[in-house]
Image: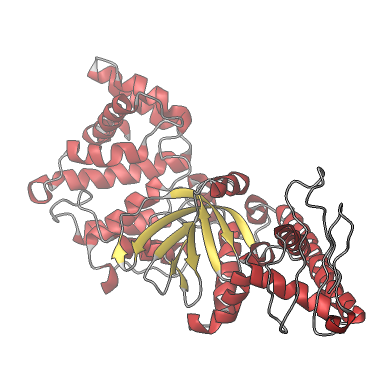
Amino acid sequence: MQKSTNSDTPVETLNPTRQGTGAVQMRIKNANSHHDRLSQSKSMILTDVGKVTEPISRHRRNHSQHVLKDVIPPLEQLMVEKEGYLQKAKIADGGKKLRKNWSTSWIVLSSRKIEFYKESKQQALSNVKTGNKPESVDLCGAHIEWAKEKSSRKNVFQITTLSGNEFLLQSDIDFIILDWFHAIKNAIDRLPKDPSSHSRNLELFKIQRSSSTELLSHYDSDIKEQKPEHRKSLMFRLHHSASDTSDKNRVKSRLKKFITRRPSLKTLQEKGLIKDQIFGSHLHTLCERENSTVPRFVKQCIEAVEKRGLDVDGIYRVSGNLATIQKLRFIVNQEEKLNLDDSQWEDIHVVTGALKMFFRDLPEPLFPYSFFEQFVEAIKKQDNNIRIEAIKSLVQKLPPPNRDTMKVLFGHLTKIVARASKNLMSTQSLGIVFGPTLLRAENESGNMAVHMVYQNQIAELMLSEYDRIFS
């Protein structure tokens, strides 16, 4: 090895006889140059194959990172399959039961996991940078099933992980929750039941996130040591991978547009492609479908209660088993033949609970929203006779399904009051139970407590003066 005698720029030259043993010549910078504030002139010689006597330039390493980041898309982007808002409740953590609290979450589904964000995707990504990481659920070995008995809400399914975590997901829109259920189920079915067999993907994930000198040196050495045609082939594969990802993103964008243009649930119902359910249907729609002014399910429940529940302590006040009530609701909604004398409905509180749930689920209560203020004004009247006549006049103005269903229901409740000595249910007790269920304002304001008093009083008057109001 010889050194140049130039005093301004010291340069090292490599002996040609050593060049074949693996010497690598690097670009040399002038240490005294005012344009170079970071680097000093160095040379790097491989004394043994694969052994570096000096570390690679930091500038070189950062450049390699930048190239790889541009060429190879992040693994998370490649794996995202679905994202959007759903209602979420975590009911178990590591097998320990938790109190059910519903919240709106931005959910991101990838090929192996689900992430729950409290904000939209853009806000969530910005918060991740500040250390607010989303809750992640590993889908490997997880189980998914519909869980109608776990909540009074409709369209609820449950995800149970191998670690014992349990989540409920829900949406009021049928086709949205169905899309999510099948997307998550397909992701789970593609994964192995044993998480350990997925180790290769985890290694790839670690490699993609790695920024170590060894990893970058590996990519650099691969490209430098290969023949020119091999280097071109490698770069083609990397660029082709990025192009393939872009194509997938375009396909996803088109699919999203297609989904948003699909017919709405209302349109499908109007065309008869999707039938209205019993629970949650408008009263007039249900009665029109059944060619009656009183829903069949209401009649069946009243008949069962009068047959075996008039003397039961706390009838309509005591709650039945929620899971069994939800099961009954499911059967009714599927339009299956219902027999309330079956042994599974032996607990009469299940029947009364289902009847109350039917009235709570009406999109518009039994006392229509447009009549709410008028009933409140009528109950405020001081003279009892004037009050009764005002209520009677309003009842007669109601649509036939509302009026006839009201007459049947309150006629049934008068029979409950007649057995108050045995079932301990007075007119006041039934008013408290049914007032808020049958009568409520469309837009609740700060007068909720006042409204509740009037709701109870109206229900009590309908019971105590049933003969005069419905004569």
Chosen colour scheme = secondary structure
Taking 383 as reference, is 269 left or right? right
Specify the farthest residue to the right: 229
Question: Extreme left residue here?
Answer: 421
Q: In which quadrant of the rendered view does residue 352 lie?
A: bottom left
User: Between 45 and 353, which is closer to the camera in this rendering?
Assistant: 45
**Is 12 located above or below residue 312 in the figure?**
below
Image location (x, y in percent) of residue 444: 41, 29
Q: How many marks?
A: 0
Question: Image quadrant of residue 319?
Answer: bottom left
Q: Is residue 395 above or below residue 422?
A: above
Compared across the picture, whether 393 is left or right of 82 comes to: left
Q: Is residue 159 visible?
A: yes
Q: Position of residue 249 (x, y in %)?
A: 76, 61
Is residue 193 at all visible to an observer of this figure?
Answer: no
Q: Position of residue 261 (x, y in %)?
A: 74, 53
Task: Please report the residue visible at 36 percent of the width from the left and 19 percent of the height from the top.
Answer: 377
Which residue: 23% across, 50% down? 316
Q: Quadrant of the C terminus?
A: top left
Q: Nearer the viewer, residue 254 or 392?
A: 254
Dividing the picture into quadrants, the one containing residue 272 is bottom right
In percent of the image, x 21 and y 33: which residue is there? Answer: 464
Q: In this orientation, which residue lies closer to the viewer: 73 or 45?
A: 45
**Residue at 41% across, 35% down:** 367
- Left or right of 9? Residue 46 is left
* Horizontal and vertical percent position of residue 141: 47, 78
Where's the N terminus, which quadrant? bottom right
The relative height of residue 235 versus residue 197 in the rendered view (above or below) is above
In the image, 7 versus 183, the foreground residue is: 7
